[in-house]
Image (cartoon, helix red, strand yellow):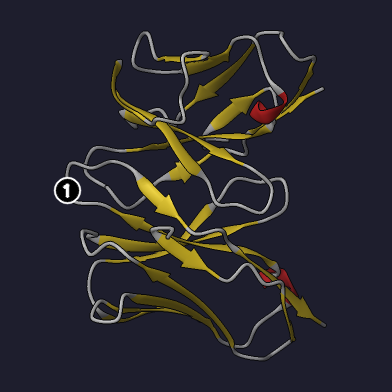
Amino acid sequence: DTGVSQNPRHKITKRGQNVTFRCDPISEHNRLYWYRQTLGQGPEFLTYFQNEAQLEKSRLLSDRFSAERPKGSFSTLEIQRTEQGDSAMYLCASRSRDSSEKLFFGSGTQLSVL
Amino acid sequence: QKEVEQDPGPLSVPEGAIVSLNCTYSNSAFQYFMWYRQYSRKGPELLMYTYSSGNKEDGRFTAQVDKSSKYISLFIRDSQPSDSATYLCAKGGNFGNEKLTFGTGTRLTIIP
């Protein structure tokens, strides 16, 4: 499978715990995005990387959230001190530099905070 | 007011019918428009994109954009049960703005 890969697919955690998600984009894509989607809503932009540089962050990304893409390949999204309101599907997407409209999404990580 | 408004449905139509899905937007500073399809527990999948007003056709799917009224539509001809999914409209910003803004999605069911 050469698509965008996300792990884990599901994560159940207790409030206050830290969680980390991983995204492996399509190999030749230098742009990587994180979105969050809650039930009955469309995806909401969280942050964006061009290679290893994090170039934009949404106001949705509180200081409990941190994202990295250390070598310009895979990315991680960490949520510290999880809250019940963090429960959502976290989607990763990638695209190549010359194709602004063709954003490819992974299947997401479904987070449930109890 | 949300930047992108989309009727969440649900919408149920019989197999073979023509489906019309619609969105409106409030900000004129958008360069391109997309429709995504999302199956349950899956990520969104790009169906169509367009930069300009008018129609763009791809097989059974037609995307229509009217920038003067800020209205975008997706038509599905000869609808099939496999078309049952949530359809999301999205808009891209000015060049250099990487963020996509999505509608809430319309849940569509095609009844065999």
Percent position of residue B80, x then y? 70, 79
Residue located at (71% from left, 8% from top): A17
Find disc 1 in the rendering and name its residue. B95
**Of residues A24 and B6, the one drawn nearer to the viewer in this rendering:** B6
**Residue placed furthest toward the front:** B1
**Residue placed furthest toward the bottom:** B17
Tell me if residue A7 comes above or below residue B70 in the rendering.
above
Residue located at (58% from left, 35% from top): A1
Percent position of residue B51, x then y? 24, 67
Quick one: quadrant of the C terminus of chain A? Answer: top right
The reply to whether residue B58 is visible in this rendering is: no
Percent position of residue B59, x then y? 47, 79
Q: Tell me the kind of residue under disc 1.
A: Phe
Q: In the figure, residue B9 lies in which quadrant?
A: bottom right
Q: In the figure, residue A25 lies in which quadrant?
A: top left
Which subunit holds the residue at mark 1?
B
Q: Is residue A111 left or right of residue B27?
A: right
Percent position of residue A75, x then y? 46, 18
**Of residues A2 and B63, the one drawn nearer to the viewer in this rendering:** B63
Tell me if residue A19 comes above or below residue B39 in the rendering.
above
Tell me if residue A69 comes above or below residue A102 in the rendering.
above
Residue located at (60% from left, 52% from top): A41
